[in-house]
Image (tube, rainbow, N blue to C red):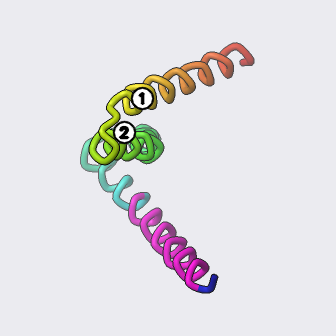
């Protein structure tokens, strides 16, 4: 059980420092490209939130040999995101 908590602590530290670096380099990218910091932040958050679907898709295709899971995951995630946006737009 102690090993699980140790792994959790290590992952927490890695995420903390990685988040700081992403924020720092996001500002650098915004300055060099001339785009706003908000725009770069949106792009970085979109990439970060899409990574689980990407890894799930690659894993299901390569390791389980089930490309149908990849297609279902991508369509399901995109449909869910679009429905959330539509619901929030309707509430606004």
Left or right, 58 with respect to 2, comes to left
Asked whether, in this view, residue 84 is left or right of residue 64, the answer is right
Residue 67 versus residue 21 in the image, above or below = above
The magenta-colored residue range is 3-22
Instruction: Specify the label residue 31 is tagged with.
Output: none
**Which residue appears at 60% of the width and 19% of the height?**
83
Between 87 and 59, the residue placed more toward the observer is: 59
Tally of marks: 2
Picture coordinates of residue 24, whole percent (x, y): 39, 61
Residue at 61% x, 79% y: name it. 5
Work out whether mark 2 precedes mark 1 in sequence or the reverse, and give the earlier one: 2
**Badge 2: residue crowd in 10 Å (few <14, some 14–19, many ≥20):** many
Determine the image quadrant of residue 36: top left
Q: Residue at x 34, y 34 (%)?
A: 66
**Which residue is the site of mark 1?**
74
Residue closest to the eye, 22 or 49: 49
Residue 38 highlighted magenta (yes or no):
no
- Most distant residue in the bottom direction: 2
Q: What x and y, as percent, mark residue 15? A: 48, 67
**Left or right: 7 in relation to 56:** right
The answer to the question of whether label 2 and label 1 lie on touching residues, with beta carbons closer than 8 A, is yes
Name the residue tied to disc 2. 57
x and y percentages locating residue 77 in the rendered image:
50, 29
């Amino acid at each position: 059980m102690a090993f699980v908590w140790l792994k959790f602590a290590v992952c927490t530290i890695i995420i903390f420092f990685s988040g700081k670096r992403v924020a720092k380099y996001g500002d650098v990218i915004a300055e060099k490209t001339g785009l706003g910091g908000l725009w770069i932040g949106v792009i970085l958050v979109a990439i970060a939130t899409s990574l689980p679907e990407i890894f799930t898709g690659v894993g299901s295709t390569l390791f389980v040999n089930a490309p149908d899971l990849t297609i279902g995951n991508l369509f399901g995630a995109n449909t869910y995101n679009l429905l959330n946006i539509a619901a929030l737009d309707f509430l606004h």
